[in-house]
Image (spheres, rainbow, N blue to C red):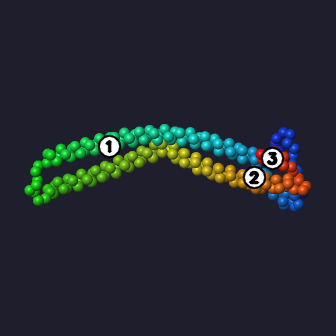
């Protein structure tokens, strides 16, 4: 059973192959149709475009990260300033507090006020933290991070498919054709194999 492989390049002579059984011939023809070298080249070009786009996103992320780092440094400075003010206020309150060394315990009303203040501070901190998290989730930086992660996942999947196609191409075509070219009566020459795959 014979079959012919015709290449799209001008001046490239068709490749005539032979099989012992019709089933083998059909399997070869089907494998050739499924493992198109031009499709792999197109897929590689698509991957390169995605890679370039990903590099651009990374550069944008670096700029955004520097801006966020600057904002964090400014906030740290503001926090330190507020801490200093709190310490100064506490010292002032200590100086203004009347002498209570002879008193056995603290006033119950003072304890209640402190508990309410502690509860309100905790509630305000939780509310502020929730607002910060929600603002970040809705921010352009978080959206760009989600897009970047999706592109990375797609790129990894496409790269795995590309490697699989190369594996099929090498093991199902390149190696058998090289072995056939090295046989006593080669149906194809090494030059023909090189012109197809290299």
| Res 4 visible | no
Q: Which residue is mark 2?
A: 169
Question: Residue 58 at x, y = what percent?
Answer: 54, 42
**Is residue 20 shown above or below 81?**
below
Q: Which type of secondary structure does the marked residue at label 2 adopt?
A: helix
Q: Which residue does the image show at 39% across and 46% down from the upper left?
A: 132
Which quarter of the picture shows residue 82? top left
Q: Which residue is mark 1?
A: 79
Q: Which type of secondary structure does the marked residue at label 1 adopt?
A: helix
| Res 87 visible | yes
Mark 3 vs mark 2: in front: 3
**Is residue 82 shown above or below 126?**
above
Q: Which residue is mark 3?
A: 194
Q: Which residue does the image show at 65% across and 45% down from the upper left?
A: 47
Q: Which residue does the image show at 74% across and 55% down from the upper left?
A: 168
In-front residue for pair 91/44: 91
């Amino acid at each position: 059973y014979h079959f012919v492989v015709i290449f799209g390049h001008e001046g490239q002579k068709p490749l005539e192959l032979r099989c012992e059984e019709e089933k083998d011939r059909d399997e070869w023809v089907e494998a050739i149709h499924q493992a198109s070298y031009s499709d792999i080249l197109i897929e590689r070009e698509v991957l390169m475009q995605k890679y370039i786009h990903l590099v651009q996103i990374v550069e944008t992320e670096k700029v955004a990260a520097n801006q966020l780092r600057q904002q964090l440094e400014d906030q740290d400075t503001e926090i330190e300033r507020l801490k200093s003010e709190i310490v100064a206020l506490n010292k002032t309150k200590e100086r203004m507090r009347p002498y209570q060394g002879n008193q056995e315990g603290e006033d119950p009303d003072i304890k209640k006020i402190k508990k309410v203040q502690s509860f309100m501070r905790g509630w305000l901190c939780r509310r502020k933290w929730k607002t910060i998290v929600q603002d970040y989730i809705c921010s352009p930086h978080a959206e760009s991070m989600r897009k970047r992660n999706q592109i990375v996942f797609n790129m990894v999947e496409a790269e795995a498919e590309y490697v699989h196609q190369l594996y099929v191409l090498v093991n199902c075509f390149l190696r058998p054709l090289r072995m056939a070219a090295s046989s006593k009566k080669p149906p194809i020459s090494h030059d023909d194999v090189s012109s197809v795959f290299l």
